[in-house]
Image (cartoon, coloured by chain):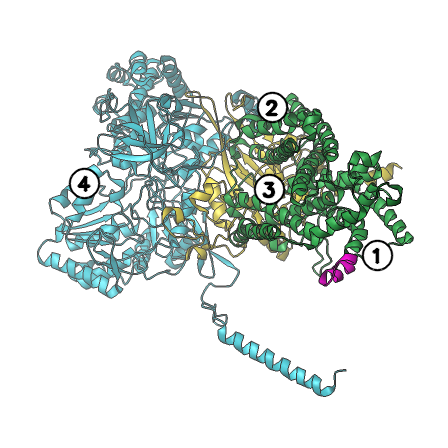
Chain colours: A green, B cyan, C yellow
Amino acid sequence: MAHQQQGTSNISYREVNDDVIKSMTETGRGFYLVLAVCIVGLALTFGLPWAYQIYVGQGVTGLQSPEYWGLYLTNFVFWIGISHSGTLLSAILFITQTPWRRSIYRSAEAMTFFSVVTAATMVFIHMGRPWNFYWPFPYPNQREMWTNFQSPLMFDVFAIGTYSTSSFLFLYFGSIPDLAAVRDRVTGWRKRFYGALALGWRGTDREWHLLQKAYTFCAVFIIPLAVSVHSIVSWDFASSKIPGLNKTIFAPYFVIGAIYSGTAGIITLMVILRRALKFEKYITKVHFDKLGMLLVVMSLLWTYVNVTEVFTGWYANTSYENEALKYRMFTTPSAYLFWLMIACNAFFPLLYIFRKIRLSIVASLLISIGINLGMWIERFLIIETSLPRKFLPFMWRDYHPSWVEWSITAGSFIFFTSLFVLFVKFWPSFSIYEIKEDIGIPMERKGR
Amino acid sequence: MLNRRDFLKLVGVGGAGAAAGFALGELTKTPPAKLIPYLIPPEDVIPGIANWYASACMQCSAGCGILVRVMEGRAKKIEGNPLHPINKGGLCARGQAGLQLLYNPDRIKNPLKRNGKRGKGEFEEITWEEGLSILTNNLMELRSHGEADRLYLLTSLIRGHLNFLLADFMKAYGSPNYLQYDLFQYENLRFANKIIVGQYTIPHYDIANTNFLLSFGADFVTTWISPVNYNYGYGQMRQGEGRNVRGKLVQIEPRLSLTGANADEWVPVRPGTEGVLALGIAYIILEGGYYRGGDAKLWKDALKKYNPEAVASTTEVSEDRIKQLGKEFATTKPSLAIGGETVSSYENGVSNLVAINLLNHLSGNIGKTGGVIPNPDVIKKSFNPIATIAKDASRRKIKTLILHNANPVFTTPETLKLKDALKDIPFIASLSSLHDETTALADLILPSHTYFEDWGDDFAEPTVGYSVATIMQPAVSPLFNTKGAGDVFISLAKTLGGNLQKDITWEDFGVFLRDSWKKIYERHKGDIKEANFEDFWNDLLARGGWWDAVPKASKPVRVAASEVSAHLSSEPAKFEGNDKEYPFYLILYPHLSYKDGRGANLPWLQELPDPMTSVVWGTWIEMNSKAATGMGIKEGDMLLVESPFGKITAPVYFYPGQRPDTISIPLGQGHTSYGRYADGRGANPIELLPAKTDPKTGAIPLNSTRIKITRVNAPKSFVKMEGVAKELGRNIVQTITPEEFKKMGKEA
Amino acid sequence: MAGFIELMLERFKVYREPGYYKRFDYWWAMVIDLDRCTGCGACVTACQAENNTPVVGEEECGKGRNLSWIRIERYIEGEYPNVKVKFIPVLCPQCDRAPCEVACPVYATYHNQDGLNVQVYNRCVGTFTCATYCPYDVRRFNWFTYNKKNFLKGNGGSSTSFEPPLDQQLNPDVSVREMGVMEKCTFCIQRIRAAKDRAKDENRPIRDGEIQPACVQTCPTKALTFGDLNNPKSRIAQLAGLSTAGDLHYLRESGSKISDISSNPRTYRLLEDLNAAPTIFYLKRVMKNGSSTAGHE
């Protein structure tokens, strides 16, 4: 039985509503504390350094010739990667009608949307003249200036634009019945707020029918989209001529890496949500078990792609590739990073082969954080070990990020967290109606 | 609906607001400080249209001609004068950076009077009237005490009519002490030329047409004598049109200079033995019977001790190599041997240069195209040894010293005690346009124009085989409250009266210059042929100079073996300090962009990476990494360099083009009072030198001491632009071998 | 059918190369004779004087942020006493198939009708992509507002890059770039424009040798030559050995190696195998044992 597997069968409909709505309406001191920490942290690590950077110039970063791309782009790729699993996983699991999807997909989708937003801020921070951020958008203007559609960055603008729009819609469509449920239970400004968001949902058959159609469409649409988005992000790098970046394998490499890091991100998030919102009964060990299995597969795939990349580069035996590889693995100022990445992404996740580890919350947390650390390092290494070893050795130069970059990197995590904190407060973070589907129709059940 | 009344109200309010805003804007607006009056524009100013003024470059003593691009009264760019026979349109980095001298923020903007203790750098601004009267009174007093000969005038190298004016002034005033000083004044070379070429001038080295250039430490593509001309010659020698043979360059020096880097072969000779090596080559020439003169026997006798075995053991150059060099030098025609600054800067510099020049004599290169072409004689100036000034000053012989652009305090070793000696002079006036270490000691500063603001001219030495005069005209009006040095002396002469007034009658230097050029015009020689002086003068200003492109037939010089051998020494140059305690030879060389230090105040030059090390904004120590093994030294570490006479601290750069027993340091940095861009930057290695000068020529031997190094913990200041200097098989700088190149010529 | 395919291929070229022109009005190019070049650095300072590139100071130089548009690269092979030193001036080679042009999302860099790869400072938003894609590392970035930044701070002094009155030297024909903008060698486009204007006034084409960028003008050894590659009689076409190659545009269209086309065996292009089609032609230096070993650092 599906619901037996879920371990959610002993919950009543009312309980579900209560739990979710309680998490939204009853605000404890803890929440305010977390929010305050987030806001202050955001201002200190993110806002002020960025303001400083805009005022003084990109020179406050550690960027230099030829490493014109630094931590900001690392973070950009990282967050795009994180964004990958949420929606993609949710869509795939929806289409395959996987039952354990239901209690995790809402927050996973939110994670997607927020990490895309975080990634987008990284692009603007990375710009030399961020006040002209809108210039890459093809808006009509009297100067008849158009954007360069040949540019991989332009592909990015569209890919990310489309991706964030569709993942938001996917999130939103799935939430409409829940928003209506919340609307029905709250008073005051909340009623008006959720009333507006629920778009007048009344729960008629027709509405359910249409919702299902729209939702299915989104799910189908998002799967190829998600693949394309990270492929396009990889083309930012792969369509250059730079040794270490110009690789045909980059698109699948990035997609696999993205799903890998995204899945790990979901596990981390689940552990935290479970503890913070006391949702142990919705997010059960079953979820960890299933996602753990997925991670083992992704880890093996990741290892395969990495070995391919290194091997073909080494086998090609050109001075360019050799130097880029050697620099990545041995001679960069922080050469241990490469080996740390291998350990985090290729070896530790293999522990998930054991069911015991899969079911252990602590082990899951550690391994998933390790994977994301490793994936961040991977992006860092891709950029920062290729650009310092371009074609002319006379220009080779090591990259040392400045405090501004580190601070904004930390700030991006706080930014993401802040968005999530607000999300759990203002949005039903679990799908009320789908968990109810899981529980089954009360009449059929005995004892209640 | 908006009714008519409301509409009008709103219009009224809007209009009033706009008017108020406009008024407010107008009130708070800062009026533009400078506008070009278009109604009656100044002469030559058309906005957006550039004027080009031909002038002379004064960044070093090469005597290149320049064109200054002036827009709206401001100098924008310097370019080489394509008509000029010395630089032929080219210009070096130092020449390009001249504009930063004109627009240097550290220029002295007003006459200054010392205010506070001497050397503290405290000055107060005064007017020109005050300044001139202080100097006039001082000079009057001196003369009235009958101590006119105790006035000393020390200038940088001045060769044009300003030199004549100053000489006239000093003569009329009654002082014989008009001195010129430059760290690189090539007196050793002139002295050596007197012996072999027969003239006390620097000849024209025809690098462009030579087929084999044997360069003994002559870094002629960076700083040596006339780098732009030699660079042009180098280009022609390698790939000149109409040449069927590519000239070969062999560089003999302990430290691979930029010229050495461009050479086909580098001979890392033991420091101080270049002269011996030259004689060894001479021996081969004589032995091989390549010498055509009748006195071959005499020469053989004179040089018999320079047999290859002996020379090889002294110079650490293999016998085979010496033989091969000798043979190649003698058989390739035309060939040319030049001795540069490295060789000249040993304590036996003259004998080295004589030995090198002898090679030209023995293989018959003198007076030949592609060899040594004698130059017209120049007026001999008194290049007095700087040591005499130190001596005279410390003996309190100098009462008043007038300085003009000379900075001997920076370019003489501390051991000469020049600075202390200058402090004993009762009155020092400086005509410098920028603060420098010597001007810092002055009591009175009367800032002079830079070469963009002044009249002048320059008679280049060496020229290219015929007379070349370059005219200097004011390209821009004076930026600050400064006066030309010539004008200062003319007005001094007027107020001092007496002989001075009689001899110096011109109203200003420009008039003097024009009058003087009449004499050149009246000779009716040279390339400018005009019917009257007015046209001649205009042509002169338009072309930027006058030259008489008729090479003089050189008269053969009798070089007697007995006379010459008196100047030769079989001994290697001496280095101070014993080799146990001080294991390294020290080679100092002029920096490409600062030369002796004069360019260090120009930010463009500070930021120009040194071609060999790519270091910017500082001093460095060049050392072979082989010598550093076992000392725990990493590149960029700060080293304390000690000689028996002084010490400096600078970062180390590992340089494979360096003998392991030798350490090189570039000159030019380590200023203490030379403007914001130079001060407190790097170290001045001249401080390591002994108090030695050449007794015959007064030259300061830069390569005359041994040193030791120790690693010290000091704040690092080492910035180099290179990443990795290896090509890694990437075929970045592609080459073909000389053999392939030769074949190419045949096919074509 | 064949016609259609040809048409599509032609269209495809335009898609691949944002700056694709069938034929340039002029095709500005440079020949650098490495056998003449001594590495003296005069061109570097001349460029700085002409193009208003700021001085950035010691600290920024240490970060590789100097703004010289032309640099002398120096490679040393071998150990004492068999040291081979080679120099190469590297400046923007105005690639025909420029990687940077594809990279820019806002068309701040594009190919103009003279075969130049031009940078529109006003349009640049500073994504750094062009500089990252550039295989020659010739693109320079304005990290700061240099006329406000004190670059002597570390040394205890005070000076901005255009400290008055040094600012009076600034060339009015060239803009001073704003913070956050990429810049690079323009082949002294201001001089090209001026010469074009002059030629137009006099109703004639530009003469060979009429335009000399600052670096070419100042070179003491005359290692650099500038001219129009469209004109097979021009000096650079002669020097590069491209005068007899018939239609020079074959070079563009075919993408062949220059050694297959040029009649001068010394002609080569830097990193030619990357197929960026640079229009600076280097003439090989003549030296013994000059080729580098493929060994690793």
Q: Are marks 3 and 2 on the same chain?
A: no
As measured in the structure, the alpha-carbon distance from the residue carrying label 2 to the one carrying label 1 is 89 Å
Secondary element at tag 2: helix
As measured in the structure, the alpha-carbon distance from the residue carrying label 4 to the one carrying label 1 is 97 Å
Q: Are marks 4 and 1 on the same chain?
A: no
Q: Is residue B352 visible?
A: yes
Q: Chain of mark 1?
A: A
Where B42 sits versus B595, above or below?
A: below
Read off the residue under disc 2.
B747
Residue A109 occupies quadrant:
top right
Q: Which residues are magenta?
A: A183-196
Secondary element at tag 1: loop
Image marks 2 and 4: residues in contact by CB distance under 8 Å = no
Q: Mark number for residue A201?
A: 1
Looking at this view, name the residue that lies furthest to the right.
A206
Q: Residue at x 63, y 45 (%)?
A: C116
Main SS of residues in magenta: helix
Read off the residue under disc 4.
B417
